[in-house]
Structure formats: C-alpha cells, structure tokens
Amino acid sequence: MEERLNKLRKSMEKSTFKEISFSEKMRNEIHKQINLPDETDDMLMAAILQLLLHEKTGYELTGLLRSRGFSKFEDNEGSLYTILHMLEQKRFITSCWNEEGAKFYQIVDKGRKYLRKQEKELSSGRIVLKGLLEE
C-alpha cells in the first residue's frame, strides 16, 4: 500500500498538484479509504443490473451481492427491495410473480443501455486511478 502512495506522490510532484503534501493524519485517512470496500451507489447499481441479466429473486440477488463483497445488505436486506423498486420505477428492470408466490426480477433494454454507460464510466475512472498509482 505504501508503495502505491509513493507512486502517487511522485506523480503529483510532477504535476500541477505539487504544492500538496501529505501529513501523517492525511496519509492514515487515505489508507483507511483505500482499504474500505468499494461500495459506491454506482457500483452497486451496476452489480445489481449485471446480476439481473438472468432472472433472479431478491433472495438470490442478496446472496450474489454478498459473494461480490457488497456488505450493505448484511443487516438490512429490505433496503435491496427499495433499490429494486426504484429500478422498476425507472424502467431499468421488470418483475413478475411465479405460481409459488416468488417475485423474479430481470433487466430490460433501457437497463442494459444504462448498465453499458455505467460500466464505461466506472472502467474509465479505474484506468485513470490505476495510471496515477503506477506512475
């Protein structure tokens, strides 16, 4: 981790941000943020939409999100259904009930377009950050 911060610092010394210095407190805060799980709302939405390329129940979705490292639903599984409802309202996904009373969710064309856009934005952000860390 320290090596990546050193690379970032060297990169910043060569750029317009050379006036910025890292105090020990700032360095510790950066370490904390880097080590936090990557659970931005955009990443979570992209993960949900990716998983819904094939029909799934909310229960299945919760388990798959946990396996991807998302812990947001550990103690509050109901919040996933709030997100699913919002995605339905935006017409990114559709839902249907089966004979046993289980509700299934699946992405639709509008959601696929949104997902492609999100994946492009998320990957370009990672490339920029990776470039900074590797310089």
Image: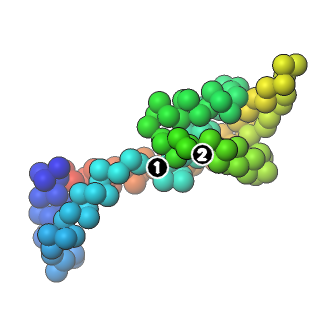
Please rate how many residues cluster around mark 1, counting C-alpha atoms within 10 Å: few if below 14, some from 14 to 19, many from 20. Answer: some
| Secondary structure under the numbered disc 1 in the rendered image | loop
Q: Which residue is mark 2?
A: 76
Residue 20's x, y, as percent?
A: 19, 77
Q: Amino acid at mark 1?
A: Glu
Residue 32's x, y, as percent?
A: 28, 57
Depth check, front residue: 135 or 47 = 47
Residue 39 in the image: above or below residue 25: above
CA–CA distance in space, label 1 to label 2: 15 Å
Query: Which quadrant, please, contains the C terminus?
Result: bottom left
Residue 127's x, y, as percent?
A: 34, 49
Residue 68 in the image: above or below residue 113: above
Q: Amino acid at mark 2?
A: Asn
Q: Is residue 124 left or right of residue 91?
A: left
Q: Is residue 132 left or right of residue 128?
A: left
Q: Nearer the viewer, mark 1 or mark 2?
A: 2
Location of residue 17 by image quarter: bottom left
| Secondary structure under the numbered disc 2 in the rendered image | loop
Q: Which residue is mark 1?
A: 39
